[in-house]
Amino acid sequence: MNAALQRVLLVSSNRCELPYPVFPLGLTYVDTALRAAGYVTRLWDCQLDAATLETVLAEFQPDFVGISCRNVDDIVYQSQETYFEFPVDIVARVRAVARCPVVLGGSAFSLYPERLLELTGAEYGVVGEGERAFVALLATLRDGGDLRGVPGLVWRNGAGITINPRAPLDPAQIQFAERSADLEDFYLRRSLMLNVQTQRGCPLHCCYCTYPLIEGRQPRRRPPAAVAEELADLARRGVKHVFVADSVFNTSNEHVREVCAAIQARGVKLTWSCFLRPHGLTAELMQLMAATGLTHVEFGSDSFCDPVLREYGKSFTFADILESARLAQAAKVRHAHFLICGGPGETRETLQTTFENSRQLTGAVIFGFAGMRIFPGTALHDRALREGVIQPNTDLLTPRYYISPALTEEELLTTLADFRRRSPHWIVGPLPPFFQQFADRLRARGVVGPLWEYYGALQRGSPRA
């Protein structure tokens, strides 16, 4: 069959809306690659489309359905809301209307490929990057080729489920993400921001982190001119703010300088925010980022206690965190710190050290998360097995958390609640509804960015405070 005659329905199954809905960038990369290869595509987003999936299937008549599985759960100990059931439901709904192969992908699928293939009954899946693999899969099926040559393909053969080796894309091969107008408009209305990616892969060794499993450990950085051109295109279409969706933007200070220089050379006028590692930053680098539009930084600090940072696999100290926060404040960049409390090495004393040190971070918002989510393939997973926290057959698709044996669950949650009462800059647990309602009002007034800088002030006057 000619590729131009094949029709592919791409489904975004992410229904998470807090703190704001996130544009499905990964699925857009796949859509861009498929259309460049001559396929006819249609995107159906469960948060956007008024038409039901069944209606779209009947009207579009796809030859293949691709489903993006972005999140397994919310990674919040107090709520433990799971999302993997929705792709299972979507596959069942596809089966009731259409007779075509289903292909799964996305970060959640990359972490649990065999489990999700079994649960959904989908024919195929892709681990890691989907652009090249999806196109290669369809061409192989069309031409009767060997499925073993499709990079990252998860498929069934006579012996069970096979997972092919991956072949990471060269960063120069990452195509410009061509966002559809209706999808872009929806997410701009809801969050007033879109997302961009300047690199893939993470070389760091945080004990819990899944980014190296999903994207690989070798950073693959896009050409800075390509990033600047993408930002310029978004600005031309009226986008005011973007979030840099890299695992960590500053894996290389040189990369940061080159991207910022390209933004300046291209004359891009928009604001942006990103994840940063609180290490190796300089006043020159922070001022350069601020000059190109950086307004918000989310630091992956994890703890404000040095012994705990070492246990977590971090290569920085609280002194580095404090200096990074000082540089952000001097550049008038708002900053938040994300902490994982109660992980390996945590005690009542280290928690108190973290709280006392947090008092030095004036002007910061601090998100305190309880427990460390255990994902397969991580160093934390190995440790949890050694310590008997989980067993080899434990199903980690259902959330399981590591809490230091020096603490009980009650101690951890009570202590974090006490920190929140003692400091309005601490945000603990799921955001209450009034936060979301307030954020919606701010966005309706045109306020852009992550908005967490308003949380502390709002919390001071809330019934919970």
Image (cartoon, rainbow, N blue to C red):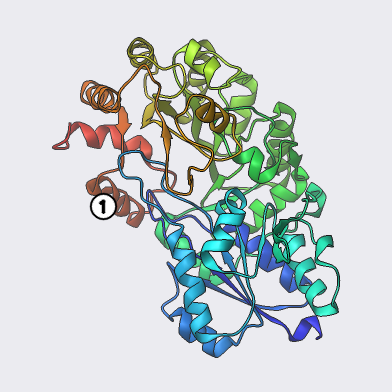
- Residue drawn at x 48%, y 44% as measured from the top left: 396
- Residue drawn at x 22%, y 47% as measured from the top left: 434
Would you name the residue on which mark 1 appears? 437
Residue 100 relative to residue 338: left or right: right
Nearer to the camera, 289 or 177: 177
Query: Which type of secondary structure does the marked residue at label 1 adopt?
Result: helix
Q: Residue furthest toward the front?
A: 159
Q: Report which quarter residue 148 is drawn in.
A: bottom right
Quadrant, the N terminus: bottom right
Nearer to the camera, 213 or 330: 213
Residue 131 relative to residue 107: left or right: right
Q: Report which quarter residue 264 is drawn in.
A: top right
- Residue drawn at x 77%, y 61% as measured from the top left: 132
Please rate how many residues cluster around mark 1, counting C-alpha atoms within 10 Å: few if below 14, some from 14 to 19, many from 20. Answer: few
Q: Residue furthest toward the bottom?
A: 59
- Residue drawn at x 54%, y 13% as measured from the top left: 317
Quadrant, the C terminus: top left
The kind of residue on which mark 1 rests is Gln
Q: Position of residue 379 (x, y in %)?
A: 59, 29
Placement of 164 over or under 413, stated as above or below:
below
